[in-house]
């Protein structure tokens, strides 16, 4: 069994959660990543460097005030190549959560750190679940349940750290979240919007200063998470690995 040292606490928490929920998990190392586009170029999956942008999970954290004036924090998840259609998100909240008319705001960096202990590039649905003790409603765009491309149906995101990635099955992740809803609220942007995103990425790239990791190879799943040992045309072979 491969031993892994100096594992960040956030990564351990993600791994332990996956073990408890019997989720498939593969943890991997990558150079420090910030945006979804940046991360997708650096992820390691099935022995290859880089994944399609649509296989990188994009997570946003927003809030609104309900009819009683209470602040409600929500998380949205879609594919990395998509953008949020605010009108659909707003309609769902107003029609299904008894909130009355709402205005949705993005949770700024300071509030993100204060409320959930996270920063840009490390926002993760499992850590949102853990940090909020299951109180944050998490919305998943229905498109993440559709298999795209030749890969085995997995997606990736950060594991709570800029240099650690996690590979998972979307349906297992959704099933492990306490308060969630799956519906359509994201879309693939037109070419003009894509060009704007590419310009922004070239200008800013990875945000912040981080030390690059020493290895870019996938490592076995930790803490009993079910790691994918190999990718085959006929399917996947899973193996449970030891605990941390």
Image (cartoon, helix red, strand yellow):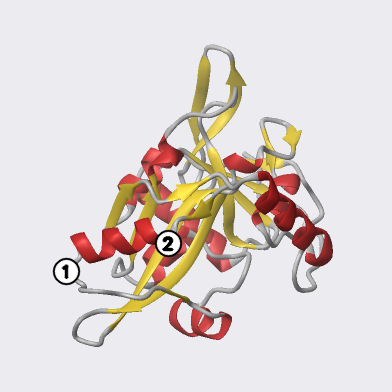
Separation of marks 1 and 2 at Cα, in angstroms: 18 Å
| Identity of the residue drawn at 68% across and 58% down | 5
> Disc 1 or disc 2, which is closer to the eye?
2
The reply to whether residue 203 is visible in this rendering is: yes
- Crowdedness near tag 2: few (<14), some (14–19) or many (≥20) residues, C-alpha within 10 Å: few
**Residue 98: mark in rendering:** 1
In this orientation, which residue lies closer to the viewer: 191 or 60? 191
Q: Residues within 10 Å of mark 1 (few under 14, many from 20)?
A: few
Residue in the picture at 53% in, 47% down: 222
Residue 61 coordinates in the image, percent (x, y): 46, 69
Asked if residue 183 lies left or right of residue 192, the reply is left
Name the residue: 55% across, 48% down: 82
Q: For residue 179, what is the image quadrant?
A: bottom left
Locate the N terminus and report the quarter of the image it occupies. top right
Residue 23, above or below 165: above
Residue, disc 2: 86
Whether the residues at callouts 1 and 2 have beta carbons within 8 Å, the answer is no
* Residue drawn where x is 59% and y is 16% of the image: 232
**Image x and y of residue 241, in percent:** 51, 39
Tell me the SS state at disc 2: helix
Disc 1 is placed on an element classified as loop
- Residue sitting nearer the eye, 28 or 220: 28
């Amino acid at each position: 069994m491969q031993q892994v040292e100096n594992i960040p606490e956030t990564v351990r928490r993600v791994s332990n959660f996956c073990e408890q929920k019997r989720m498939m998990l593969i943890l991997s190392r990558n150079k420090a990543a910030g945006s979804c586009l940046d991360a997708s170029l650096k992820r390691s999956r099935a022995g290859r460097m880089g994944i399609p942008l649509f296989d990188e999970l994009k997570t946003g954290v927003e809030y609104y005030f309900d009819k009683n004036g209470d602040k409600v924090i929500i998380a949205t998840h879609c594919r990395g190549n998509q953008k949020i259609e605010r009108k659909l998100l707003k309609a769902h909240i107003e029609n299904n959560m008894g909130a009355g008319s709402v205005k949705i705001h993005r949770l700024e960096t300071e509030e993100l750190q204060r409320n959930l202990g996270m920063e840009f590039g490390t926002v993760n649905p499992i850590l949102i679940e853990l940090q909020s003790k299951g109180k944050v409603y998490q919305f998943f765009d229905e498109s993440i349940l559709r298999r795209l491309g030749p890969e085995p149906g997995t997606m990736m995101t950060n594991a709570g750290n800029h240099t650690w990635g996690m590979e998972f099955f979307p349906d297992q992740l959704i099933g492990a979240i306490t308060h969630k809803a799956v519906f359509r609220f994201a879309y693939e942007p037109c070419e003009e919007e894509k060009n704007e995103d590419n310009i922004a990425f070239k200008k800013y790239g990875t945000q912040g200063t981080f030390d690059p990791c020493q290895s870019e190879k996938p490592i076995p799943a930790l803490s009993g998470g079910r790691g994918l040992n190999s990718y085959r045309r006929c399917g996947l072979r899973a193996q449970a690995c030891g605990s941390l």
